[in-house]
Image: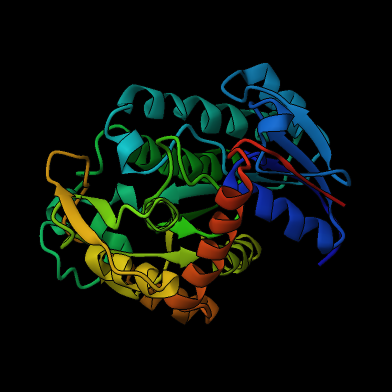
Amino acid sequence: MSKLTILVAGAGGFIGGHLVESLLKQGHRVRAVDKKPQWQWYQRFHEAENLTLNLEDKQACIQAVNGTDWIYNLAADMGGMGFIELNKGLCMLSVLINTHLLMAARHCGAQRLFYASSACVYAGYKQKTTDNPGLKEEDAYPADPEDGYGWEKLFSERMCRHFREDFKLETRVARYHNVYGPNGTYDGGREKAPAAICRKVIAAKMGGTKEIEIWGDGLQTRSFMYINDCLKGTQAIMNSGILQPINLGSAEMVSINQLVDIVEDIAGIKLKRNYNLSAPKGVRGRSSDNTLIKELLQWEPSITLREGLEKTYAWIYDQMKSGSSKDDVVNKF
């Protein structure tokens, strides 16, 4: 593939930072944009053009997009279930980002836009039992997504579709299922389950408390995708001719109790489990059906949950042991 000028929106975030690194290594010119001050980015690369812009603003989007060929939109106000259940209005405001990026892409003549959607678009009535067989792409309709965050994602998916149909802007959409790994948030309220469990187990081990709080009854099920698999799948979808939203996740479904089992085993410790039944806990069961992406792209995750958690645990352990802030930026290149 020829070298491109690529905008990564949300470059200061977890997935965005890893994507910038991958694109730079491939020789592309990268414009990295996030609304956070750059000292708060999880990773920052000196070889990229790093800009601090609030992409909820249309003029900021035009500035970010102008002169770029491709756009990866990973920007959103989001976090784990503890954040999205309590911040529905903030999550909905992210609709401004994708809307203005689409408008800017059309205005500036960009060739293609990737939109990072979420498994939260899937109908709640399909996720009421822990033995979820895997969500297929068609399970998003009739619509009953996660309130707030899921509705914004589903609406933005359709915006991408109609900009492609009406204005001939090439768009690609992936529905992410619980991405995790190093160089992301692990405390502060926006972290997702793998990072939160790693942090809690490490804190219990370091502090000698021998206890852990689990949100919900621990029986709720999920699947988790390691960041390296996410990057490969994201770029495969962007380079493909796939026009419909498509799952990007793991089919290796586990309960939250099983997730804790794995992290405890990595840490070499067993903890007393205290279940907080009033905490945000999301749907009962969610996993990815990868039939379509296997058929069209021959893609499936290559890193098992155990392998990915070992890498994630080690990184979070090092951060906590050194006393590093979750906001300490990692500068590379």
Residue 79: give x, y in percent of width and height. 42, 40
Name which residue lies at 61% across and 63% down: 231
Looking at the image, is 54 positioned above or below residue 20?
A: above
Looking at the image, is 261 positioned above or below residue 119?
A: below
Q: Quadrant of the N terminus?
A: bottom right
Which quarter of the figure has residue 287? bottom left
Name which residue lies at 25% across and 44% down: 145
Q: Residue furthest front?
A: 208
Q: Which of 37/153 is in front? A: 37
Q: Does residue 190 appear left or right of residue 233 in this picture?
A: left
Residue 183: give x, y in percent of width and height. 61, 52
Residue 203: give x, y in percent of width and height. 42, 51
Residue 273: give x, y in percent of width and height. 20, 58
Task: Please indicate, yes or no, whether residue 172 appears anywhere in the rendered image.
Answer: yes
Q: Does residue 308 appear left or right of residue 108 in this picture?
A: left
Looking at the image, is 157 positioned above or below residue 134?
A: above
Name which residue lies at 58% across and 52% down: 321
Q: Which of 278/323 is in front? A: 323
Q: Which of 319/125 is in front? A: 319
Name which residue lies at 43% across and 62% down: 246
Task: Please indicate, yes or no, whether residue 244 appears anywhere in the rendered image.
Answer: no
Which quarter of the figure has residue 306? bottom left
Way the structure is coloured: rainbow
Which quarter of the figure has residue 65? top right
How many discs appear?
A: 0
Looking at the image, is 38 positioned above or below residue 150?
A: above
